[in-house]
Amino acid sequence: MRSSTTFRKTDRQSPRVAVRPWAIALWLLLWQIAAMAVGRDFLLASPLTVLLRLCELLRTAAFWSAVLHSTLRILLGFLLGALAGGVCAGLSLKWRHVRELIAPLHAVLRAIPVASFVIVALIWVPSRNLSVLISFLIVFPLVYAGTLSELERTDAKLLEMARLFRMKPLRRLIYLYLLPALPALANLCATAMGMAWKSGVAAELISIPAGSIGERLYKAKVYLMTGELFAWTLTIVLLSAICARLLRLALRRLAARLERM
């Protein structure tokens, strides 16, 4: 299929370098050597200690409850931010005044640090829902700018041809705008997903909502449980990578289904 081929070409053109097992093994070895040199687990836990602690956490209901709590809220913030960014990008492409209206907001959202967002938002938003808002505020400008940039690359000659042949607006949206942009938007959304996880957990770490990953990180830091701290950090990295991967697969399937319309 053309869409699948386009996704593969985009992957090959990406500057990302594959993660090799030997590189992971080398970094783990350096980590182990550093932990042995320090000699105190509360300062620097070894990889084995972190792995054992993670295995212990996996057997507890509290672990899965915290994962579910944070995942649902961060994904909700991501979806709302991505949807709002995409819609606003489409409106900005069609109407110049909408773009001018959003420009100051976009600039502010890109410039203000996450910590400032969190502190101000805590005045109005309960701590349990703060990660939704922060994830939204981080994802929106990324998706908005990236989507608008991709939509502006649409070939003007193709648009003129669509007008001459009176192509239906829905088919014009799918075949001239959405399908060509989907591979780039998949990479963009995967990046935004990673940012959503980073900002969402950072918001939880500051606001400390009960039953969240941020709360568990905070307690591990306060009680110098470095092994648990690293175990939760590894969990966040894995959750972020899994969500980004599933998102790319979903967009790939969406592109294939749109091709058949």
Image: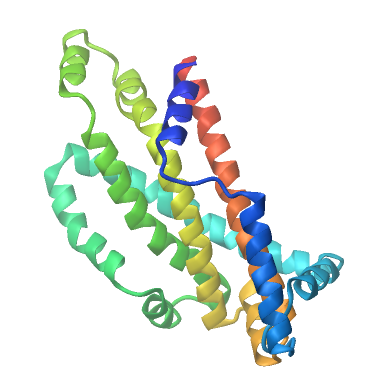
Indicate whether 115 appears above or below 75: below
Q: Residue 256 at what x, y percent from top left?
A: 51, 22
Foreground of the two, 50 or 61: 50
Q: Residue 21 at what x, y percent from top left?
A: 66, 51
The quadrant in which residue 247 appears is top right
- 178 horizontally vs 210: left or right: left
- 229 horizontally vs 133: left or right: right
Examine the rendering and report whether any part of residue 212 can be seen: no
- 189 horizontally vs 40: left or right: left
Indicate whether 186 appears above or below 244: above
- 119 horizontally vs 203: left or right: left
Residue at (45, 81) in percent of width and height: 122
Foreground of the two, 251 or 226: 226
Indicate whether 87 appears above or below 27: above
Foreground of the two, 142 or 166: 142
Residue at (42, 33) in percent of width and height: 10
Indicate whether 207 appears above or below 27: below
How many numbered circles are shown?
0
Q: Residue 193 at what x, y percent from top left?
A: 50, 54
Examine the rendering and report whether any part of residue 85 can be seen: yes
Residue at (67, 88) in percent of width and height: 43
Residue at the farthest top position: 165
Q: How is the image coloured?
A: rainbow
Q: Residue 157 at what x, y percent from top left?
A: 16, 18
The quadrant in which residue 180 appears is top left
